[in-house]
Amino acid sequence: MTDAAIPMMSGQESRPEARRTPAQDAPLRLAIPGMNCGGCVASIEAAVRALPGVADAKANLTRKTLTAEWTGGDLGEAAVIAALADVGFDAFPMDAVDPDDDAERRDLVMRMAVAGFASANVMLLSVSVWSGAEAATRDLLHWISAMIAVPAAAFAGRPFFASALNGLRAGRLNMDAPISVAVILAVGVSIAEVWQGGEDAYFDAAVMLLFLLLIGRWLDRTMRDRARSAAQALGRMVPSGAWVLGTDGAREYRDIADIRPGDAVQLSAGDRLPADGIVRAGKGTVDAALVTGESHPVIVSPGSRLDAGILSLDAGLTVEATRTGEDTSLAEIMRLCAAAEDRKSRLTRLADQAARIYAPAVHLIALVTFIGWLAVGASARDALLVAVAVLIVTCPCALGLAVPMAQAVASGTLFRRGILLKDGAALERLAKVDRVVFDKTGVLTGGALSITNVEALDNAALRRAMSLALHSTHPLAKAIADLGQARALEGFTASDIVETAGEGLAGAIAGKQARLGSAAWCGVPDTGVQTGLACWYVEEDGLRAEFRFEDSLRVDAGAVVRGMTEAGLRPSLLSGDRSDAVTRVGSSLGMAEIAGALRPEDKIARVEAWQASGESVLMVGDGINDAPALSAATVSMAPSSGSDIGRTASDLVFTGERLGAVTEAWHLARRTRRVILQNFALAAGYNAIAIPIAALGYAGPLVAAIAMSSSSLLVTLNALRLNGGAS
Amino acid sequence: MTNLLLLIPAALFLGLLGLAAFLWSLRSNQYDDLDGEAERILHEEPL
């Protein structure tokens, strides 16, 4: 029943290079993570409806999305996003919903409703039969049951019949095969029974079986949908367009698909580059953390080559696009991801493993029962009835619910702790991990810089430097401002502030000329500290202060790595950053293996080498350069702050600042696996008791109905233990 | 026996009515935004 009839979602949504046009026919979908009250809904809808060209706008508070219908005109998605920013909401474009997807979910609920209605009503009639209806009354009740159960089973059972057929065509027996056989035989034999005025009919069992199994399937589905829409709502890293400077000097906002090699793209602070390119004019700093794993801001000047996805930290860079669309380094990474995904051997899912043993065993036992009864002289009709009782009593529904119930409950628990699970099967793979591979930048480190020479800084100098730093969004300036605020300092008034990209700030602090920036900018002799790791504050009367930086580890990184080593996992570090920085971080954390300066191809190669030696690898990474390794790893996890491609390639996404989410997910995965195995054991133990009783002919429809519901209930209750609780 | 002839159809009819009502509400998107509808009712629609 957990057969992969529903296509796996990983790697199929949010292709960043997908073309997004402000089409007049396709409705616009935006994710608005900040929408969380009724008032927000009202103001968001009002703001968008007021735009010319928007026919209707409907916000969905549950999914935190907005759908807008166009009337025509050339209003683009950028205008809608701008209008939402005016009322205070960040919005991100989302992929259009797949209409089939929505229809499929609705279809499942419809079948579930019909099966529920039928099982309630047929059960009511069956209870009357069991409590002693005789002769004509019994026949009447049976006939009414048949009239409800036959169409209901045909309608509600279709997903199972279809999946069982698909499985048979592919030459394997999945869990849906015994389900289909049990339902069809139960209904068929019951009709034959009723026709002859017999007393045993299994209509109630057939529809109840379907109802319970549809609940399991629906849970599975809901879990995936919820994680998917939440993952999409995290926003995307690759811009949908950029400002392009025309030859005539006019600026034009162009869709990413319309940017051609040779176009001059203008970047403002906070913009991401939509294509590979070469800097033509301007000087500035860029953040390549998500692209290469480089942790420090890089200074670029005319002639520097930049990869798509790089974040500009200053205004005023003009970049000539050299490679666009399918040719960019980003598209190359996507191809590496797809190739790694293809090479990855699919682990057999627990449910399928169980079905492989279970399905033939059940059919064999039923067949043996049938032949056995014939052999001891029973009529064909009696032998068949007993065989059907065996089929129903063996009840694949406890088995069918064993996996999705546990995974759905675990996924809900993870969700409440800020971890999104995209596919329940990922939990099975996570439970067997023996090596955890971390990326450095953005995973072990929080991305923010911190000042290392804190003791050497006195408050007077810090307060003056902070006054200047408050006027910049540069990461180094932010780190200085943060330290000042942490010491509860208040800035002086600053005036005449000038920011020179790639150099620093200049201005007047409380009447004195001051500069904050690189050693050269401040006119201080270079102390040999690497660019991007130090800056100076100088004033005209000779006051000087040096600030040194390093990227700060996530607060719980040390504890997490230690905990993993103690639990017998092998934590390792693979990073694209410079080797010395990687080694420093890795050895301070006590990593088993450390490697730096790796390209995306090298990361895949290492991950696959470990897998080839029989290890299951959990990859935790965020960057574009990690994406191929994330796809290749047995199971993967990305922080929500990571790149779009990294999140898409991962099975789990965690939000928040704590790296402990990784350990938490691992512990819960292990508990889930335990619960699933217990559920299988419960189902098997129950079968060990029920099969002999049924095979000897003592199980009538009443016993079958009680057995089926009680075993399903038991499995469900066991799965609910995964709800909450400490790890 | 005769009361059964009356009561069973009545019970089934009511059950079907409930099923039909559920399917109708499902088809008209009433379960798409459960949180949103709960909030919307508190806000006055400018008509």
Image (tube, rainbow, N blue to C red):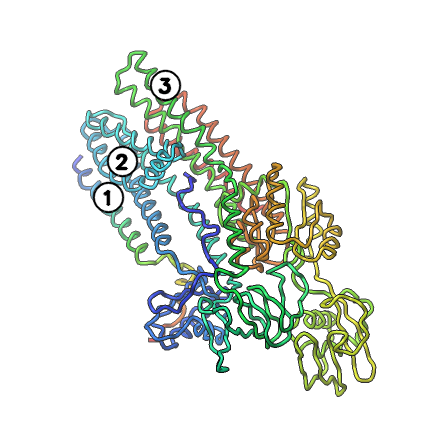
Q: Which residue is mark 2?
A: A125
Q: Amino acid at mark 1?
A: Leu
In the image, residue A528 sits, relative to residue A568, either above or below, namely below
Residue A562 in view in this figure:
no
Q: Which residue is mark 1?
A: B12
Task: Tell me which numbered mark, 2 or 3, is placed earlier along the sequence.
Answer: 2
The residue drawn where x is 36% and y is 27% is A391
The residue drawn where x is 25% and y is 47% is B16
Q: CA distance from mark 1 to mark 3?
A: 40 Å
Q: Are marks 2 and 3 in contact (CB under 8 Å)?
A: no
Judged left or right of residue A428, residue A555 is right
Q: Nearer the viewer, residue A679 or A700?
A: A679
Q: Where's residue A298, x and y in %?
A: 66, 67
Q: Nearer the viewer, residue A594 or A454?
A: A594
In the image, residue A3 sits, relative to residue A106, either above or below, namely above
On the image, which quarter does residue A704 sit in? top left
In the image, residue A681 sits, relative to residue A290, either above or below, namely above
The reply to whether label 2 and label 3 mark residues of one chain is yes
Q: CA distance from mark 1 to mark 2?
A: 11 Å
Q: Can you say which quadrant of the picture contains the C terminus of chain A? A: top right
Residue A427 in view in this figure:
yes
Which mark is drawn over residue A368? 3
User: Callout 1 environment at 10 Å: few (<14), some (14 to 19), or many (20+)?
Assistant: some
Label 3 marks a residue whose chain is A
Label 1 marks a residue whose chain is B
